[in-house]
Amino acid sequence: MDLKQHINTDKLPAHVALIMDGNGRWAKQRGKERIFGHENGVEAVRDTVKAAADIGVQYLTLFAFSTENWCRPHLEVETLMDLLIQAIGNETPELHKNGVRLQAIGDLESLPELCREKLEEAIKLTANNTKLVVTVALSYSARWEIVNAAKKIAEKVASKTIHPDQIDEEMVHSVMETASLPDPDLLIRTSGELRLSNFLLWQVAYTELYFTPVYWPDFRRQHFFQAIIDYQRRERRFGKLDNKVAVTKNNF
Ligand code: IPE
Ligand code: IPE
Ligand code: MG
């Protein structure tokens, strides 16, 4: 049965963020090297992007490589970067055909040159697409992003472009890597880990969190749809009271 039919298209999350985790353990279960897991993760990305576009999600943000991931063994990092270059090359024509706009956030300067070039090419090619914005977080960490944002604001103050009193949430948002994106409505993490691992810490203030034990290489459209259905059953209150709760409170 396709879970798609249980999704309420009037209540879709506009922005879904995804921590794609569990590639190494998936490979280990099969007696293979970790990179085998990363290779098999590409199919999961393909299926998830298609699923998001299929139901009309507008923004999908994928955590692909963290600042901290640079500290993994050299061979794993190098092979991951090669895989990334290959995946961007292979996947971009199909993404473009399907109206997907590709973006990237993170310290892109730190990526190998070929990787940056391929990425820039894909970003440029897909710049006018509007069906779905896919943002890949590469060499990204939320604390790195927040430190950079603080520096940008400090520079504006130092040059007297702004007064400290003018700093508000909107301004902070505007200097974040995700300035062009709304905050995520839903964040999915695969592999059973119950943590955020330095991902979008500023942006997830009121994001609904969904954790699944599925390892990333096994993640498919039905898992994605299951997360959306779970999200749609929740009541987002943003610290306020809904009508029912408010009435009960007033009665006491
Ligand atoms: C996620 O899978 C991919 C990256 C972090 C690059 P992992 O490589 O973290 O796999 P596990 O968590 O060790 O199983
Ligand atoms: C988070 O996964 C980063 C990505 C998925 C790219 P990690 O595997 O690096 O996170 P930890 O080490 O389990 O917290
Ligand atoms: Mg991991």
Image (tube, rainbow, N blue to C red):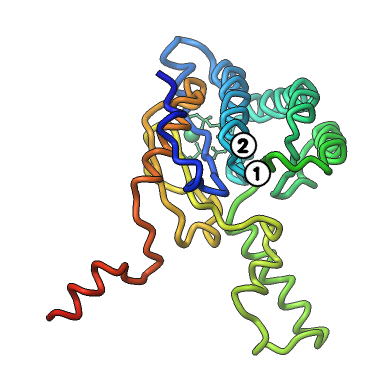
Q: Which residue is mark 1?
A: 137
The N terminus lies in which quarter of the figure? top left
- Would the CB of label 1 be found within 8 Å of ligand 2? yes
Q: Quadrant of residue 174?
A: bottom right
Is residue 189 something one can see in this rendering?
A: yes
Q: Residue at x 83, y 43 (%)?
A: 128
Q: Earlier in the sequence, mark 1 or mark 2?
A: 2
Type of the residue with mark 1: Ala
- The residue nearer to you, when weighing 169 against 10, is 10
Q: Residue at x 67, y 74 (%)?
A: 171
Is residue 138 something one can see in this rendering?
A: no
Q: Quadrant of residue 3?
A: top left
Q: Is residue 120 left or right of residue 193?
A: right
Image marks 1 and 2: residues in contact by CB distance under 8 Å: yes
The residue most toward the top is: 31
User: Helix or strand or loop: what does disc 2 sit on?
Assistant: strand
- The residue nearer to you, when weighing 140 against 16, is 16
Residue 248 point in image, percent of width and height: 18, 73
Checking the image for residue 93, the label placed there is: none
Q: Residue at x 61, y 79 (%)?
A: 168
Residue 125 point in image, percent of width and height: 86, 36
Residue 141 point in image, percent of width and height: 60, 51
Q: Tell me the CA gap for discs 1 and 2.
A: 6 Å
Q: Which residue is mark 2?
A: 64
Q: Is residue 39 left or right of residue 85?
A: left
Q: Residue at x 37, y 43 (%)?
A: 194
Type of the residue with mark 2: Ala
